Amino acid sequence: MHDSYAARAPGLDAPLNNALYIVRLSDGVSWMLPGVLGTPRLDWDNALGITCDEIFVEVFEQTTTTSTERILRIRLDSLGPGTPPD
């Protein structure tokens, strides 16, 4: 049996809360991946899909002159031990 995950990013309208949140549904362990508020700036956007091994996430990278949309693939086993639920 494979674990199921959910993910959420607050979106570009909440820059001070710019993070990607991932939760393993079976036990509530979670991960928070912060964005980067410097230059270049990295804003998490939509989680596009999650498999049992990876998450695919849309991000925006902004410099002082350009904004580039990218899709990142992140291996779930690279996230580390995570934070247990409260």
Image: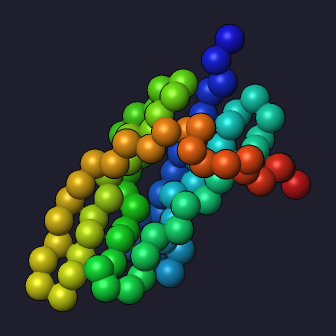
- Position of the N terminus by quadrant: top right
Q: Position of residue 33 (x, y in %)?
A: 55, 61
> Which of the two residues, 44 or 54, is positioned nearer the viewer here?
54
Q: Position of residue 22 (x, y in %)?
A: 59, 47
> Which of the two residues, 43 or 76, is positioned nearer the viewer here?
76
Q: Does 56 sit above or below residue 51?
A: below
Residue farthest to the top, as pictured: 1
Q: Does 83 sit above or below residue 55?
A: below
- Position of the C terminus by quadrant: bottom right
Please tell me which residue is depicted at 62% across the width and 27% down the height of the picture: 4
Q: Is residue 85 left or right of residue 75?
A: right
Please tell me which residue is depicted at 24% across the width and 54% down the height of the picture: 70
Q: Is residue 11 left or right of residue 62?
A: right
> Which of the two residues, 53 or 50, is positioned nearer the viewer here?
53
**How many numbered marks, from 0 up?**
0
Residue farthest to the right, as pictured: 86
Q: Is residue 76 left or right of residue 70?
A: right
Please tell me which residue is depicted at 83% across the width and 49% down the height of the picture: 85
Image color mode = rainbow
Q: Position of residue 34 (x, y in %)?
A: 53, 68
Q: Position of residue 75 (x, y in %)?
A: 49, 39
Q: Does 21 sit above or below residue 62?
A: above
Q: Does 67 sit above or below residue 80?
A: below
